[in-house]
Amino acid sequence: PPDPLQQHFDDTIARDHRVEPRDWMPEGYRRTLVRQIAQHAHSEIIGMQPEGDWITRAPSLRRKAILFAKVQDEAGHGLYLYSAAETLGADRADLTRRLIEGRQKYSSIFNYPADTFADVGVIGWFVDGAAICNQVPLCRSSYGPYARAMVRVCKEESFHQRQGYELLLTMMRGTEGQRAMVQNAVDRWWWPSLMMFGPPDGDSPNSAQSTAWKIKRHSNDELRQRFVDMTVPQAERLGVTLPDPELRWNEERGSHDFGTPDWTELQRVISGDGPRNAERVSRRRAAHEEGTWVREAAAAHAAKQAERREE
Ligand code: FAQ
């Protein structure tokens, strides 16, 4: 006879209803979600570093205030996502330990350096733009707490994307040197941004199952295509060239054809050998260790409060 719990879960997925924390779920579903949500949370937190490097060097008070707010938002997204992982029984301290011991992944994109202030703009435009393409469909992901978190996160990401693009528009109206700085940042971030969507579909071991469970709603290549189609007209408006000689409009497909990212580079960066992997993780570890006293103080305070309530 069919297992009634499994049957209920299958029906929930088939009807496009949401799976909630108290519902029974297959162990593989839980494991996949913890994996993806934890990687996503780690990406937000590690992702504070490349732009965070520019907070003290922002060229004006206005740019500094914007950048500060943006980087703080990323921290908020990370904490929000760790909470979503906790609804699946994951332990936040354990997830952090896995990150700083190099046992859990975070997005490849944050292992590249932000060399100039134009990088801040390009990160907003490309990296937040790619994050939006990837995350808007996750608002309809089958797991309730993750889907709901994505709604709020996407709203903030779209502000992030606009601040980046606006920064670049301003630089493009500036000096020859500033325009060159923007083009240089575009050249360095374009291919790594395309890699954010993951390996090509034929080489994506998790896709079939995650799609069947409606965690993923579109394939890695579909979302990559959507990002390219969205970004090309923005590049034209801005007056920069995307560094891909194969990039052209395909009338028949109603989409852009584009070149192939260097997939060996993605594998290398994911496996720890990118330009900034060691620095990103060691800074995360140092911040965690320096924050020990804060966590201890907060725990002591909470214990005292609980004791008082009992009295
Ligand atoms: N980097 O079978 P698939 C942000 C791994 S946005 C590193 O295709 P899946 C906002 C993958 O985990 C960035 N690893 O896997 C922000 C898997 O390894 P595993 C974060 C990658 O899960 C902006 C293996 O390769 N966004 O933070 C990458 O079905 C600006 C095989 O791949 C998310 O995490 C990569 N690029 O699809 C913050 C979105 N690609 O776990 C600050 C949620 C693949 O089996 C500043 N995640 N891998 O050992 C997802 O949508 C999916 O997990 C994918 C990968 C699409 C990333």
Image (cartoon, rainbow, N blue to C red):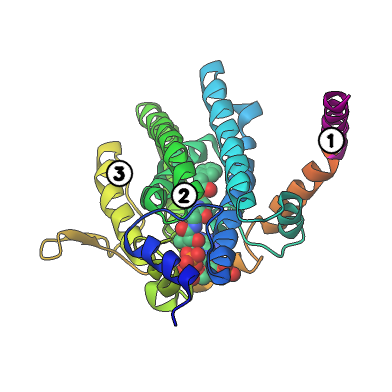
Quadrant including the C terminus: top right
Measuring 41% from the left and 35% from the top, which residue is drawn there? 155
Identify the amino acid type marked 3. Ala
Q: Residues within 10 Å of mark 2 (few under 14, many from 20)?
A: some
Identify the residue under disc 3: 235
Q: Which residues are magenta?
A: 292-311
Judging from the image, what secondary structure is the residue with disc 2 in? helix
Mark linked to residue 144: 2
**Label 3 or label 1, whichever comes before in sequence order:** 3
Residue 285: x percent and y percent? 78, 49
Q: Is residue 232 left or right of residue 7?
A: left
Q: Residue at x 82, y 31 (%)?
A: 302
Secondary element type, mark 1: helix
Task: Give the foreground label among 3 and 1.
Answer: 1
Counting from the top left corner in percent of width and height, residue 20 is at 50, 52
Whole-number angstrom distance, CA of label 3 to CA of label 1: 49 Å
